[in-house]
Amino acid sequence: MAAQYLLAIDQGTTSTRAMIFDIAGAIVASSAEPLQQHFPRAGWVEHDAAEIWGSVVSVCRQAIKSAGGVENIIAIGITNQRETTVLWDKNTGAPLHRAIVWQDRRTDPYFSGTKLKWLLDKVDPDRQAAGAGDICFGTIDSWLIWNLTGGAVHATDTTNAARTMLYDIGRGQWDDELLQRLNVPREVLPEVKPSCADFGGTEAKLFGRSIAILGVAGDQQAASIGQACFKPGMIKSTYGTGCFVLANTGADKTLSANKLLTTVAYRLGDETTYALEGSIFMAGATLQWLRDQMGMFGDAAETEAMAKAADPHSGVYLVPAFAGLGAPYWDAHARGALIGLTRGAGKAEIVRAGLEAVAFQTRDLMIAIGADMELADLGAPTRLRVDGGMVANSWFLQFLADILDMPVDRARINETTALGAAYLAGL
């Protein structure tokens, strides 16, 4: 008998990864490729949607080969950078513009709705093509589903739909008033399905035979699933390009009194589980800036030793507001600052300040989440589950645990985003 493996496609902001898991959750194979960022103007961030698609095919083929062949793959799960917005021609499948990335500031640094309006104003200002159904809109999951199925399926899942600003997360449907306000024809929208659902099968020519796509979730929701945050009150924080803290609030849609987002954690069948979310725009991206723009180190693995060697009383602080500040401040006009410098401050002190800055921002989010959880009778947070590239740094996690005054649990498998997508497909 062929082995039974699950293929997870993890399409992120800075890279595309394919990971293959066995049905016990162990990693069998993995392949990744970096993704180019485009910055046409200050504050604008774009991706080449065709490059994203090409990278997905490439990493999947490599991973499938390493896992012993396509006959071992029983299903695919997809997880993706959320809010990044793509428009494509329904008839040709060609992108009509570069994808506008979730970080982009030309309209709104987060949700897809205003990005979609901007794109439609650019390529179809009178909405004739869109209204006729000749244009498709999608977040990255929809773009991948469309291409994987050869254009047979135009769909998204509830978690991604919840990030568009066009979807009523309470009623579970596209919202006519919001569509009208943003001048978005309903004809461009994908069908919304639960996170576990039949999203079609891949074209046989891509990987050697058709594979069913059975699970889809936005990256932060997938990470929450991968971290097994299934009970109300459980919290995870993912440290990738940004940092995203999700707190499971159960079947009740809890509205924040502390400037957090109410979102969908996942939808299984007819049951929706909600979450509170706090977002930091610059987490791992802060270390990228220190490495690439400032030349502070050559590899992120060096930052742990640098932080340990730094003077803990240097008074150096980094405010990484390079793209404004996310929750709970939502200050789009804030900019980064490096303060407290003296002649004694060096690379180690600045790198430590960068790591501390991510921890300080996490604490801000946890204070806000804790206040909202208590209002919702969920109790105060007692521990935090963490994943993502930055959690390899034990100094950072210990500093985080110290200032939160609670246990911080590091995932045994760090790639919990891909793991969550595989869980959904397996389920």
Image: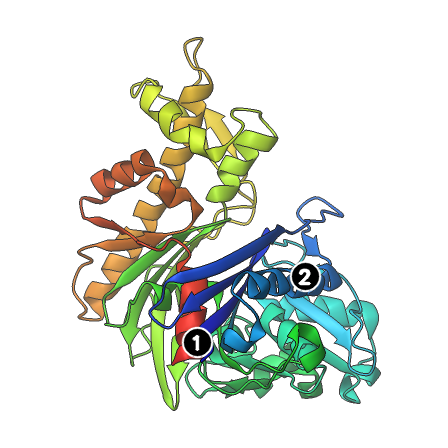
- Separation of marks 2 and 1 at Cα, in angstroms: 27 Å
Circle 2 SS class: helix
Front residue (pair 144, 18): 18
Image quarter (top left, top right, bottom left or bottom right) of the N terminus: bottom left
Q: In which quadrant of the rendered view does residue 57 lie?
A: bottom right
Q: Measuring from the top left, give residue 5's x and y in whole percent.
A: 45, 72
Amino acid tagged 2: Ile
The residue under the point 53% across, 30% down is: 290
Q: Measuring from the top left, give residue 40's x and y in whole percent.
A: 76, 48
Whether residue 222 is visible here, answered yes or no, is: no
State yes or no: discs 2 and 1 in contact (Cβ < 8 Å): no
Nearer-N-terminus badge (2/1): 1
Amino acid tagged 1: Gln
Return the residue found at the far front: 1
As displayed, is residue 112 above or below residue 356?
A: below
> Depth-wise, is mark 2 or mark 1 nearer the camera?
1
Image quarter (top left, top right, bottom left or bottom right) of the C terminus: bottom left
As displayed, is residue 160 above or below residue 81?
A: below
Q: In which quadrant of the rendered view does residue 383 lie?
A: bottom left
Q: Which residue is mark 2?
A: 52
Q: Residues within 10 Å of mark 1 (few under 14, many from 20)?
A: some
Q: Residues within 10 Å of mark 2 (few under 14, many from 20)?
A: many
Q: In which quadrant of the rendered view does residue 234 lie?
A: bottom left
Q: Which residue is mark 1?
A: 4
Horizontally, residue 369 falls left or right of residue 63, namely left
Q: Measuring from the top left, give residue 375's x and y in whole percent.
A: 21, 67
Front residue (pair 319, 351): 351
In the picture, the disc for residue 358 is none
